[in-house]
């Protein structure tokens, strides 16, 4: 069956590391598309000072030349915290016959028990846990996920063979670019930041005077 990736985050701002990760997932899992979903009110982070509308606009600019990356504003279109389980429920109603794959960082996976209705996630999708370049490449499965781990390096078709319920670990780490560091460099007008974000996003940031204070 077709496999759809789900890439959520604040994207504050979206940078080349995000795009490199999305391309790696496309190349590894052969997804038909990846839904890029900016969070409106992230439950586990402070609400970004840059508005959701600006962040969505930057995502749209960053992915405009990549047809398999699709901006999805479903979390911006509803009220309240951007709970992942509610997003998955909506996407499952939209894509009842496709496999869904939720991408998340290794640090997010380890904190998964703090997420709203976290035990239900695998009822809607697979989990792809991404190894960060600055962290040790290990993954401790939660006991509730025992028996659900697959190796997509040797069996990349596993996620497309069923609609949900599996976990895998992506060991091909993306470039080590931090949104926090990118914002700080933008505030300092540091020239190096131009190599970390797409040109169209850089232009948008300058035109709208974002991250100036």
Image: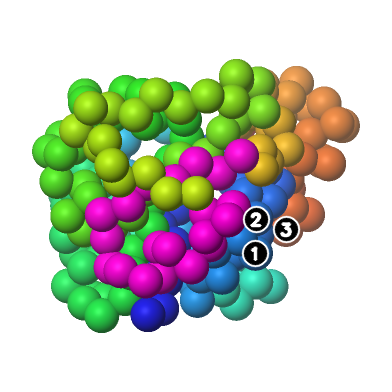
Q: Which label was assigned to residue 200?
A: 3
Horizontal relation, residue 132 to residue 197: left or right: left
CA distance for labels 3 and 2: 22 Å
The answer to whether marks 2 and 1 mark residues whose Cβ atoms lie closer than 8 Å is yes
Is 101 rendered above or below residue 40? below
Q: Which label was assigned to residue 24?
A: 2
Task: Tell me the quarter of the image containing the C terminus.
Answer: top right
Q: Residue at x 58, y 56 (%)?
A: 154
CA distance for labels 1 and 3: 24 Å
Is 9 rendered above or below residue 23? above
Q: Position of residue 78 (x, y in %)?
A: 19, 55
- At label 3, counting other C-alpha atoms closer than 10 Å, the crowd grade (few under 14, some 14-19, many 20 or more) is some
Quadrant housing residue 187: top right
What residue would you read off at disc 1?
Answer: 27
Single out the residue that lies furthest toward the right: 191
Q: Is residue 88 magenta?
A: no
> What secondary structure characterizes most of the magenta part?
loop
Q: Residue at x 26, y 54 (%)?
A: 165
């Amino acid at each position: 069956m077709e496999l759809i990736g789900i890439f959520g985050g604040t994207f504050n701002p979206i940078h080349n590391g995000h795009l490199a990760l999305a391309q790696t997932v496309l190349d590894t899992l052969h997804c038909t598309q990846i839904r890029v979903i900016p969070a409106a009110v992230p439950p586990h982070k402070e609400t970004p000072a840059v508005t959701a509308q600006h962040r969505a606009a930057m995502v749209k600019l960053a992915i405009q030349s990549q047809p398999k990356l699709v901006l999805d504003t479903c979390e911006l279109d509803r009220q309240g915290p951007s709970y992942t389980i509610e997003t998955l429920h909506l996407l499952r109603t939209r894509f009842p016959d496709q496999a869904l794959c939720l991408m998340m960082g290794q640090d997010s996976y380890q904190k998964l028990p703090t997420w709203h209705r976290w035990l239900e996630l695998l009822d809607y999708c697979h989990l792809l846990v991404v190894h960060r370049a600055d962290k040790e490449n290990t993954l401790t499965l939660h006991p509730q996920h025992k028996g659900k781990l697959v190796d997509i390096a040797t069996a990349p078709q596993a996620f497309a063979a069923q609609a949900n319920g599996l976990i895998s670990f992506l060991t091909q780490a993306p470039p080590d670019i931090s949104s926090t560091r990118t914002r700080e460099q933008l505030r300092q007008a540091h020239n190096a930041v131009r190599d970390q974000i797409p040109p169209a996003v850089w232009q948008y940031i300058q035109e709208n005077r974002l991250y100036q204070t």
